[in-house]
Amino acid sequence: MEDNKKPTFNVLFARGVVEQDYLEFLKKIFPDYNVVGIIRELNKSLPHVINLILFTGGEDVTPSFYGENKGKFTKNNRHRDDIEQDLFHRMYYQIPKLGVCRGAQFLTVMAGGKLIQHVTGHNNTTDSIYYQGKVLNIPSDHHQMMYPFNLDKSKYSILGHSLHFKSDTYLNGENENIELPENFLESEIVFYNDFNSLCIQSHPEWISDNTDPSFKSIMNLIRSKVLKEN
């Protein structure tokens, strides 16, 4: 089907920059749509329909957003956080949101969760993620980790987690190891129900082969959350 005959799928880039690798990734996820990356600019109206808000990778989230001091390994960008927080609160919560790596961490914080400020074992590697009875192998490069465990269990669903604990360190803003709760898992894929936010800690956009079984599983997951497909 030619692009001009496909329905349009508007992706709002929360950062304010259309990042080409993420746009190409979404085009693979939604091949039956004409995927358009857009940004919010002053004095410029957005399309009537926003199909997805995308929160991408990058710097650490400012720890004061989740009530902690800044640890020695944390490198944040407060200006970016302010921009994305403003957008998050101004857009209707029912619009689907996808967070990748730093974006996943940011959406976790917006949902009321916390972050572990430093972990090991997840830098420049491939994470083996247990998801729906199978193992997904996805490129990964992060030193912080989503921590939704301070929330009521009804507020989030851990859809995927590390097959084995890869880190031997879980530092807070005081540079001390936190006490892990009994239900702790190294959360890799989390969905926050109240905010329609799907958070993927690894980097599926780095998978070059869209026939890869792990890519197909992520593709089906994203489509199911965004398009409400079964």
Image (cartoon, helix red, strand yellow):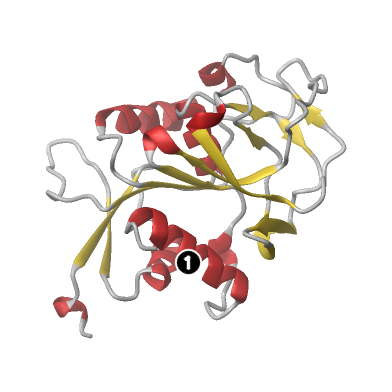
- Residue at 34%, 57% (x, y): give it: 228
- Disc count in the image? 1
* Residue 77 seen in the current view: no
Q: Is residue 23 above or below residue 45?
A: below
Q: From the viewer's perspective, is 129 left or right of 84?
A: right
Amino acid type of the residue that numbered disc 1 sits on in the rendered structure: Met
Q: Which of 205 and 219 is in front in this view?
A: 219
* Residue 167 seen in the current view: yes
- Residue sticking out furthest to the bottom: 1
**Relative image position of residue 189 (x, y in whole percent):** 58, 48
Q: From the viewer's perspective, is 129 left or right of 177?
A: left
Q: In this view, does 82 lie above or below 221?
A: above
- Residue at 82%, 50% (x, y): give it: 164
Q: From the viewer's perspective, is 53 left or right of 125?
A: left
Q: Nearer the viewer, residue 223 or 178?
A: 223
Image quarter in which the N terminus is found: bottom left
Quarter of the image for residue 222 reads bottom left
Quarter of the image for residue 85 reads top left
Helix, strand or loop at label 1? It is helix
Q: Which of 78 and 229 is in front in this view?
A: 229
Q: From the viewer's perspective, is 203 left or right of 55?
A: right
Disc 1: which residue: 219
**Relative image position of residue 10 (x, y in whole percent):** 24, 57
Q: In this view, does 214 lie above or below 163?
A: below
Mark 1 Cα shell of 10 Å, populated few (<14), some (14-19), many (≥20): some
Image quarter in which the C terminus is found: bottom left
